[in-house]
């Protein structure tokens, strides 16, 4: 009887050991799969981040280019406005000179 009991205990220990090994293997397999999924997701996120950063950099370059063009255009308008103001000032002074001359001619004729 003791022999049978001992044999049953040995078999139960073997089954237990086998189950523990099998569970450990399953655990390792799941951990490996989870690690693979994690690294895959991290790689995908890194690529997305890199792509987004590249798109943002390109957008900022376009905005900078447009601002530079706009700045040049405003500078050109500023120069034209200054030239126009100088022309108006010159013509105004000539107009005043002619009016003075006309008044003086008008005074002599009276």
Image (cartoon, rainbow, N blue to C red):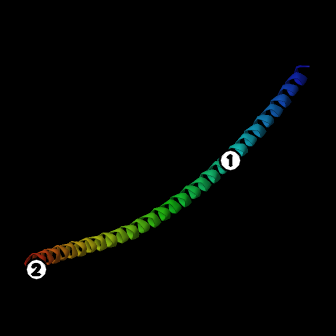
Q: From the viewer's perspective, is 105 left or right of 57?
A: left
Please state, as top left, top right, bottom left or bottom right, where the C terminus lies in the image.
bottom left
Q: From the viewer's perspective, is 90 left or right of 104?
A: right
Residue at 38% of width from left, 68% of height from top? 68
Q: Which residue is mark 2?
A: 109
Circle 2 SS class: helix
Q: x%, y% of residue 83? A: 26, 74
Residue 7 or residue 64, whichever sits in front: 64
* Mark 1 or 2: the one toward you: 2
Residue 6 image-quadrant placement: top right
Circle 1 SS class: helix
Q: From the viewer's perspective, is 27 left or right of 73?
A: right
**Mark 1 nearby-residue class (10 Å; few <14, some 14–19, many ≥20):** few
Vertical order, 43 against 74 (above or below): above
Residue at 40% of width from left, 65% of height from top? 67
Q: x%, y% of residue 63? A: 45, 64
Vertical order, 94 against 2 (above or below): below
Residue at 65% of width from left, 47% of height from top? 35
Label total for image: 2
Tell me which numbered mark, 1 or 2, is placed earlier along the sequence.
1
Residue at 25% of width from left, 71% of height from top? 85
Vertical order, 30 against 67 (above or below): above
Q: Which residue is mark 1?
A: 32
């Amino acid at each position: 009887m003791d022999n049978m009991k001992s044999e049953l205990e040995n078999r139960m220990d073997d089954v237990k050991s086998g189950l523990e090994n099998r569970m450990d293997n399953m655990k390792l397999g799941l951990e490996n799969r989870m690690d693979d999924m994690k690294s895959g997701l991290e790689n995908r996120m890194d690529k997305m981040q890199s792509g987004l950063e590249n798109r943002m950099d390109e957008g900022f370059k376009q905005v900078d280019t447009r601002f530079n063009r706009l700045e040049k255009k405003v500078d050109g308008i500023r120069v034209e406005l200054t030239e126009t103001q100088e022309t108006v000032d010159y013509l105004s002074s000539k107009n005043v000179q002619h009016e003075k001359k006309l008044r003086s001619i008008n005074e002599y004729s009276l």
